[in-house]
Amino acid sequence: MTANSLLARTGQSWKFVLGVAALLAGSIAPLFEASGIGWTAGTVIACAGYAFTLLAVRCPACGSRWFWQAALDAAVYAPIFKGPACPACRRDYSGG
């Protein structure tokens, strides 16, 4: 993820990082008995991270949930990570 991504431009990179971290932690932690996280808890943590990302990352202007839209249409991923504008309302966040 770059500083030019739509996530960075709108200050939502932390939401993406938090959601992915929870998804990975919930998926990997149950593999290690010392973590104390069982498969059920790991699944809940992973699903919560995924759901958080789907619901929390949204356009400040129109409220469109970008990762929800991307889950329905994979073509939306490119604008989220590379484009300067919201894929739904086309609001430009390039700052120029």
Image (cartoon, rainbow, N blue to C red):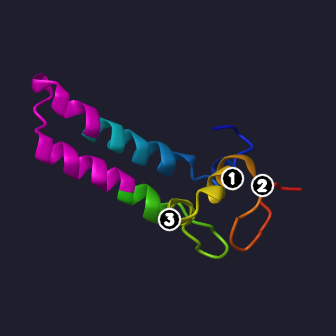
Mark 2 secondary-structure assignment: loop
Residue 63 in the magenta stretch? The answer is no
Image coordinates of residue 74 in percent, x first then y, are 59, 56
State whether the magenta stretch is mostly helix, strand or loop.
Answer: helix
Q: Nearer the viewer, residue 65 or 13?
A: 65
Q: Which residue is mark 2?
A: 84
| Left or right placement of residue 77 versus residue 17 in this view | right
Q: Circle 3 sits on which residue? A: 68
The quadrant of the rendering that contains the N terminus is top right
Give the spatial CA distance, label 2 vs label 3.
18 Å
Quarter of the picture holding the C terminus: bottom right
The residue shown at (19%, 43%) is: 42
Q: Amino acid at mark 3?
A: Trp
Q: Is residue 62 above or below residue 27?
A: below
In this view, the residue in front, 58 or 39, is 39
Q: CB of mark 2 within 8 Å of CB of mark 1?
A: yes
Structural distance between the alpha carbons of marks 3 and 1: 15 Å
Pinpoint residue 7: horizontal percent, then vertical percent.
63, 51
Q: Which numbered dot is residue 61?
A: none
Give the residues drawn in magenta, as a range.
Answer: 27-50
Which residue in the protein does label 1 denote?
6
